[in-house]
Image: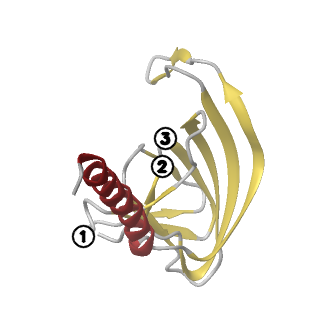
Amino acid sequence: MSKINRKLTIAAVLVAGAFGGAALRFAWATPGAGVMSAVLSGAVLLDEIDTKGESDTHEVEIKTRGEWEMRVVHFNIEPGGHTGWHSHPGPVFVMVTGGTMTLYQADDLDNPADYPAGTGFVEHAGRVHIARNEGDVDLELDAFLLVPQGAPLRIDEPAP
């Protein structure tokens, strides 16, 4: 085999392996079930953020580098429904407005957290999780997503 043919064969094997790995990742992904979503606002482009606030008992600081996109999305998850395992490339501020969300983290499956209507939390970037509606009424939530410009809102992940 000539040097050129050998190089072309190696390149073809590497490309096929890359596409095969990507296809395998999607085959392992866990799509959601019983979920409807609607974008309420965005995408809105933000420059860098560097803001602080404090009182006698509270303090907050948000700082970013580079350009970011923000969106607000409303989700309705029917009883027995779930989001599928996924992560986000940026923080997500979640506000539960109806029903109760049960949140499972891939790195702590034995300790799910319940969030009833009127509560919320911040999901950290890169943390693999699934939100389930284990109740008997629709789960309603609004999510404020902050992601690097051009990044996907959601990254499908395999079940742990």
Residue 91, percent across and down?
Answer: 49, 41
Q: Judge from the rendering whether residue 32 lies leftward or rightward of residue 23; answer left or right.
A: right
Label 2, residues with CA under 10 Å away: few <14, some 14-19, many ≥20: many
The furthest residue to the front: 2
Q: Is 128 above or below relative to 136?
A: above
The N terminus appears in which quarter of the rendering? bottom left
The C terminus appears in which quarter of the rendering? bottom left
Residue 131, percent across and down?
Answer: 48, 67
**Numbered disc 2: secondary structure:** loop
Q: Which mark is residue 70?
A: none
Viewer-side residue, 62 vs 115: 62
According to the picture, the residue beneath numbered tag 2 turns out to be 88
Viewer-side residue, 35 vs 43: 43
Residue 41, percent across and down?
Answer: 77, 44
**Residue 14's image quarter?**
bottom left
Query: Are discs 2 and 3 less than 8 Å apart at CB?
Result: yes
According to the picture, the residue beneath numbered tag 1 turns out to be 110
User: For the residues carrying marks 2 and 1, which lies nearer the camera in this image?
Assistant: 2
Q: What amino acid is at disc 2?
A: His
User: For the residues carrying marks 1 and 3, which lies nearer the camera in this image?
Assistant: 3
